[in-house]
Amino acid sequence: MDKLLTFPDQSGMTLSIRAKALLFHDPRSSELLQQVERIARSDATTLIVGETGTGKELIARHIHNQSGRRGPFVAVNCGAFSETLIDAELFGHEVGAFTGATQARSGWFEAANGGTLFLDEIGDLSLALQVKLLRVLQERQVVRLGARQPIPLNVRLVAATNVDLHKAIAADRFRSDLYYRLGVATVHLPPLCERTGDILPLARHFIDVYSGKLKLEDVTLSSDAKVALLSYEWPGNIRELENVIHFALIVCRDNQIQAEDLKLTGISHRHHTHLARQAPSAPPPPSADSLQQQLAALVNSMIDSDQPDLFDRFEEAVVRTAFDSCHRNQVQTARVLGISRNILRTHLKRFGLIGFEAAGELGAVGGAASHGELLQH
C-alpha cells in the first residue's frame, strides 16, 4: 500500500497555497521517502528544497514523526512576518524589549524545545536574522530580545526554501556559512510533473476527501480526464491538483469527472516529449563545440542572404524554442535561459506568446505563493 502523508487535522480542509497530501507511488517518490526516513533517524539539521506546493512541510512533519522526538512540531513561515516581528517571534522577548512588549514571551525556538522547528521560506530571512540563527545553531541556546541570560535548547531544525540559495549567496542575500549549517542533510523534492506516478493516486485521494463534503458517492475519473491530468504540467504542483479536483467535483455530472470539468490553464505536451526523448533510435546529443559551429554557420548563412532584423529574429527564436521546450512553463524557461522571470515575461509579451493580462495574473500568483501562513502549533 502506498504511503500517504496528510496534515493531522483534515476536518477543515480549505484551498491553500500549501500541499496538504503527499503520496509515494512513483518510483522516484519511493526513493525519496526512503532517503527522508534515513535522515529522520539522525538529529541532522535538514534543508528541504522544492517548488511551492510540492509538500515541503509534510516532509518536515514526517521527519519529525520518524525521529522519535517527544517534543512538539512547530512550523513557522519566515515570509509571513516583518523583520522586527519575526525576530521576537523566533527568539522571544522580555518586558520592555520594544514598544508594546508589556509581558515576557517565549519564542518559537523555546516552544519547539525537545521537538522540531520547521522554518519555511528560509531564504526570506534578512542577513541580520541569518546571523542570529547561525549563532543559535552553533551554540544550541537562544537569548530573548532584551535579555542577557541564554536559554539552552534541544531543538532539531528543518528549513525549507523554494528559491535557489546558491544564487542568493552569489547575490550576497544569503550567508554561505548558514547554508552549509542548514544543509547537513538536504532533501530535493521534485515537482509533481517529474513524478507522474503520483498524479492519479493523489487525484483519487482528493476525490475521496471532497466527495464526502459534497455528499457525492463513487465518483470516477473518465479516461480522457486521466489523460488530461497526466499530460498537464502542474506549475502549482500538488496544491493545484487539489484545487482542480475540488472544482471538478463541484461541476461534474453523473458522478464522473470528464476532461472538460478540469479547470486547467493549458495542456502541455510534456508526456509526448518524454516518450520521444526515450526513443531508442534517438541519436546522441551533439557536443557544445559542434552546436557552436552549427550556430555560427547558420548566422553566417543569414548574413550572406542579407536577412533583415537578424538579432531580433534570433532572440525571438531562442525565446520561442526555450518556451516550447519547457512546455510553456515560465519558471523553467527563465532558468534555462539564465534570466529572471520578469525579463522573460517582457520577451514573451513582446513576441506575443502571452497577453498582458496573463502575465499579470501569473505575476500575482507568483507573488501570492511567496507569502505563506503561520501554522499554529
Image (spheres, grey):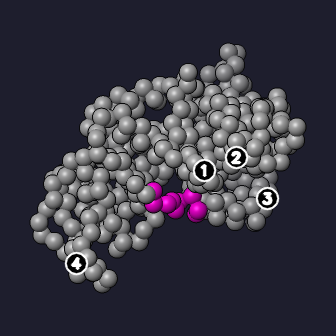
With 174 as the anchor, is 223 left or right in this view?
Answer: right
Mark identifier at residue 213: 2
Give the vertical position of 371 relative to 41 (above or below). Answer: below
With 98 as the anchor, is 241 left or right in this view?
Answer: right
Question: Which mark sits nearer the N-terminus, 4 or 1?
Answer: 1
Question: Which mark sits nearer the N-terminus, 3 or 4?
Answer: 4
Main secondary-structure element of the magenta-colored stretch: loop
The residue that mark 4 highlights is 95
In the picture as drawn, the residue positioned furthest to the front comes out as 215
Q: CA distance from mark 2 to mark 4?
A: 46 Å
Q: CA distance from mark 3 to mark 4?
A: 58 Å
Q: Quadrant of residue 196?
A: top right
With 150 as the anchor, is 104 left or right in this view?
Answer: right
Work out whether residue 268 can be spotted: no
Is the residue under label 1 in contact with that under label 4 (CB below 8 Å)? no
* Residue at the image position 20 percent from the left and 60 percent from the top: 142
